[in-house]
Image: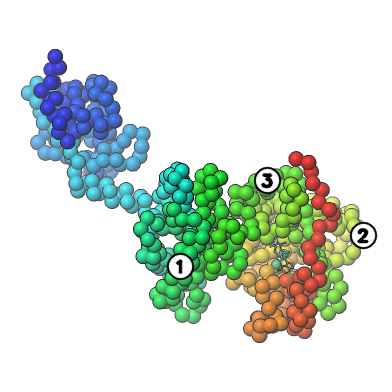
Amino acid sequence: MNPFSDYALLDALLSSIAVLSPEGRIVWANRSFCRLSEQPLENLTGLPLPQALTLAPPYPEDEAGAPLPPEDFTQHLLEHAATCPAECLLLRAGRAELSYAMIGCVSLLPDGHRLLELKENAQAHNLHQQLYEQARRDALTGLLNRQSLQMLLHELHQNTADARGYALLLLDIDRFKVLNDYYGYEVGDEILLALGYHAAGLLDEGQSFGRWSGHEFLCVLPGFDLNRAQIVAEKLRLALKDRFQDDELLPEGGPRELTLSIGVAAWRPEDRSPQFLLSRANAALFEAKHRGRNRTVTDDKCRGDSIFIAAGLLHDAIREGRLLPAFQPIVELSTRRVVADEALARLITPDGTIKPAGLFIEAASQLQLAHRIDIAIIEQTIQHCSTAPFSGIAHFVNISADLLRQREGTDRIMELMQLGCNRCGLEGAAVKPLVIEITEREMLNDTREALDVLRPFIDFGLRLAVDDFGSGYSSFRYLVDLPISFLKIEGELARHAATDRRVRAIIRGIQAIADDLGLITIAEHIEDEATADTLRDMGVAWGQGYLFGRPELASAPCILPR
Ligand code: C2E
Ligand code: MG
Ligand code: MG
């Protein structure tokens, strides 16, 4: 007969009860205790208490304020809680998180056995809930954090079997970094807080909104297809823009507009994980930025590939030599004589489609593959110019920040340059035909560091050009810190020279700086005669654009059999 059959009555109680031997081993436990320890009574019998349950104090216990280790705490509970109950937390073995908040109470039985009773403590339970909530929330905005969003997506994805699907909106505050740098972190934090506050009030029940990364937010819409999700995205974008305006978050005296770009992606049956949607939403967001920000783009309207697809394409293309330079002429505007060309990367897909750099270069940077593209393009450019009859024109090449960070990359380019120049008998020439284009987007933060990396090229006789000048805020610094020879005026600016008086004022300013510093200006994206003439009359020296010639591959792409 079970000597503890009397205790069987305790099975009916809600609290978790165990009978412990004088040595602290479990002699018997009620059903609730077995549930709590996740073990059947047979396994529990004979186990020392700490092996059945890990109990820990909910607050620092020793004099130094450090919590007692769980073993010591259990001992403490058994020794001292005979009369007064102690608060404790139940830690699940092997998992870091708290899973229960208890109150422990030990009664002495006549035969030296002890009865341990664990009850849920509402207050401690609330604390536990609070800690759990805190772990799910972003500390600044109080929104769901990335981890919670990932869990939510995972669950939602597993439940898409009911074919209702779900959609994602990836929101990004336009030019947040610039605003943050300009106005300071406090204003930046205010913007993030305001976004979270307003967005939460604009969504319906069942829709979730959280902070995905620094200034990116994710909205999860269960049961939504692409069209309906786009409507929600536009509603959010416009409403948030209005609220931002009402809030007057940005102090006077600098950029005042606060806008959002949104990428939308909806579940497709072929999506094997939420990662596929996320990467499409990311590509759509990138496209929204590329089209001028302050807009919503859906994943079916993306020009670029999602990073997932781009990664596969790029790795294969690099390995199989399917990255080729296309050369676009650069002319002197006063004579229309070709004075230079720019090598632009083209990716040839296995079926022979030619993808321009604009579709993959951003993904390549994110995947830290851009330097491999640079090396492939520069190598072929040098090859091309050193084998073709000497034309005397300059060859502009684009380089990425990745390349500047890789010693092997810059060494390799130097080596190729020396070989090419030797072949052309240019080793002694003070100025070499290659010009390195750097963009603000691609530059290192520290221009002195950039100068250190570029120094061997400059000493060798290569010249530097600032690409897309006028698109950012800090490229003026390059003019001070780096020995620049060319200023390429950003296409979006240059293309409006004939039609917009304000654009002309800006270009006149750029030209005055260039004249003062002895730099050659090159206007990009010239597509019509009126623009070419206007720019020429304003003193811009050289021009590049579809009017003078599109980028053309030097040789027909050779498609390797796969
Ligand atoms: P970018 O260096 O400013 O090059 C000019 C871009 O404008 C090229 O796009 C060119 O095809 C396009 N373009 C030229 N004329 C016109 C025009 O009249 N109208 C319009 N709308 N566009 C014109 P692409 O080739 O797609 O390259 C995009 C960007 O990708 C380049 O901008 C450059 O920043 C980057 N890139 C290109 N090749 C490389 C490379 O080998 N390495 C690195 N790191 N970046 C590259
Ligand atoms: Mg360029
Ligand atoms: Mg450019």
Marks 3 and 2 close (CB-CB < 8 Å): no
Instruction: Point out the frontmost of discs 2 and 1.
Output: 1
Disc 1 crowd rating (10 Å Cα; few below 14, some 14-19, many 20+) is few
Q: Position of residue 54 (x, y in %)?
A: 27, 33
Q: Nearer the viewer, residue 353 or 20?
A: 353
Q: Earlier in the sequence, mark 1 or mark 3?
A: 1
Q: Residue at x 21, y 24 (%)?
A: 26
Query: Circle 3 sits in a helix, a strand or a loop, which is it?
Result: helix
Q: Which residue is mark 2?
A: 389
Q: Which residue is mark 1?
A: 235
Q: Amino acid at mark 1?
A: Lys
Q: Residue at x 47, y 47 (%)?
A: 163
Q: Amino acid at mark 3?
A: His
Find out if the beta carbon at label 1 lies less than 8 Å from the nearest ligand 1 atom.
no
Q: CA distance from mark 2 to mark 1?
A: 59 Å
Q: Amino acid at mark 2?
A: Pro
Query: Circle 1 sits in a helix, a strand or a loop, which is it?
Result: helix
Q: Which residue is mark 3?
A: 315
Instruction: Point out the frontmost of discs 1 and 3.
Output: 1
Q: Nearer the viewer, residue 103 or 171?
A: 171
Q: Nearer the viewer, residue 397 or 200?
A: 200
Colour approach in the figure: rainbow
The answer to whether residue 91 is left or right of residue 254 is left
